[in-house]
Amino acid sequence: MQMPKILLYLIFSCFINNLIAQDKIIVQHKPEKPLKELMGQQAIANFDIIIENLSSDTLKLEKIVVAFVNKQNKLLQEKYMDNNGTAPSILMIPNRQWNGATQITVFNPFPELKYANTDQLHYSFTFKNTRDSEFAVKHTVILYNYKQSVPFILPLLKTTLVYDGHDFYSHHRRFDTEFKPIKDLGFTSNMMRYAYDLIVIDSNGNKFRIDGKNDKDWLGWGAEVRAVAAGNIVALVSSQLDNKEFNIEDLKQKPLALFGNYVVIKHQEGIYSLYGHLQQNSSLHLKIGDKIKQGQRIGAIGVSGSSFIPHLHFEIQNSLQHGAEGLPSYFSNFYFVGSEKRKVVNGTINSGDIIKAH
């Protein structure tokens, strides 16, 4: 029995349209070499997926499938985000519609690697166009092991809450370089990808003495900030007021202006530690070019720059330019409060952790 010509035509048209549609979607990831950050027995893959629609058609992301494989290409896990259920998981992606020629960031929704030997992530993105036709685009991400070559200690001595780290929900992680206001400032990558906002607390978890409305009531106000490792100061600002303000336009020429008063130490080529929102004049004893020892006082916690409360912004990055990328940081000689003061020899921290130098 022969298939009707009209049905053949429809099948052929659908096939051709899907081929054309797939050819009009470009999927990339940032950074180019995503790193695996080890957290206990688990690993984290922290990167962004950039999806560009080159067509004039409106496309909607309907489903994401990712296969976790090792170096031998053996499947270790498989995960989905789709339209199943009354509150479908795909809704966790806030921007999933491309209206014509558009480029949108999708933060990797599957950052947790159950198996640290995961080597590659094979993605399949399913889109639907205005004709209700679905098609899938595949993309592979190769992961790279990160080994820290410089030993770090914590930048604060007092009991510290990691108010905001770089987990999936952290604002450091969700720095969207495709967001026009950020893109217009010249940022092409996320220097804060592995950053921390650190707040001093007491043994009862209190952050301030009265109600916190006065910055000086905060327990961290003026707390000593120390260098996590030896190196040379390569950038420094100490004159900014502790007024929680900065000039956005300055970021076009000075990407670190966001941090108000700050100190940047170069430890090795491509390894820089940044300490931001420092108290005005707390680093006056330092100058660019100074050699710094591990543990040396380099400033004090303030509220300069884009600071909402007294805290230390700390991060490791690979350069001081707009295209700088963040790097993981592993610390030694500290413990997690509640773990019976078991010393951590080499470990990382993240949002919600309460820690103290040993």
Image (cartoon, helix red, strand yellow):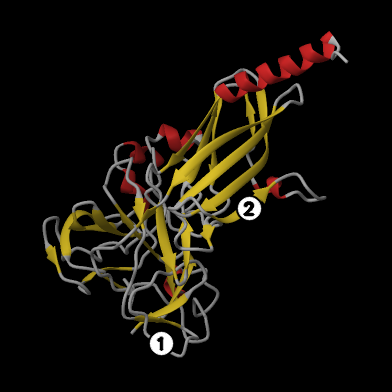
Query: In this rendering, would 286 be left or right of 110?
Result: left
Q: Residue furthest top?
A: 5
The disc label shown at residue 79, or none: 2
Whether 88 is drawn above or below 231: the answer is: above
The image shows residue 193 at horizontal and vertical percentages of 42, 53
> Of helix, strand and loop, which one carries label 1?
loop
**Other-residue count near label 1 (Cα within 10 Å), few / some / many at <14 / 14–19 / ≥20:** few
Q: At label 1, which amino acid type do we have?
A: Arg
Find residue 194 and report its image quarter. Answer: bottom left
Whether 203 is drawn above or below 17: the answer is: below
Q: State the residue at coordinates (32%, 64%).
A: 279
**Other-residue count near label 2 (Cα within 10 Å), few / some / many at <14 / 14–19 / ≥20:** few
The image shows residue 314 at horizontal and vertical percentages of 35, 62
**Residue 215 visible to an observer of this rendering:** yes
Q: Residue furthest right?
A: 1
**Residue 195 visible to an observer of this rendering:** no
Q: At label 2, which amino acid type do we have?
A: Lys
Query: In this rendering, would 351 be left or right of 78?
Result: left
Q: Nearer the viewer, mark 2 or mark 1?
A: 2
Whether 190 is drawn above or below 223: the answer is: above
- Which one is in front, 157 or 220? 157
Q: State the residue at coordinates (37%, 84%).
A: 343
**Residue that numbered label 1 is attached to:** 342
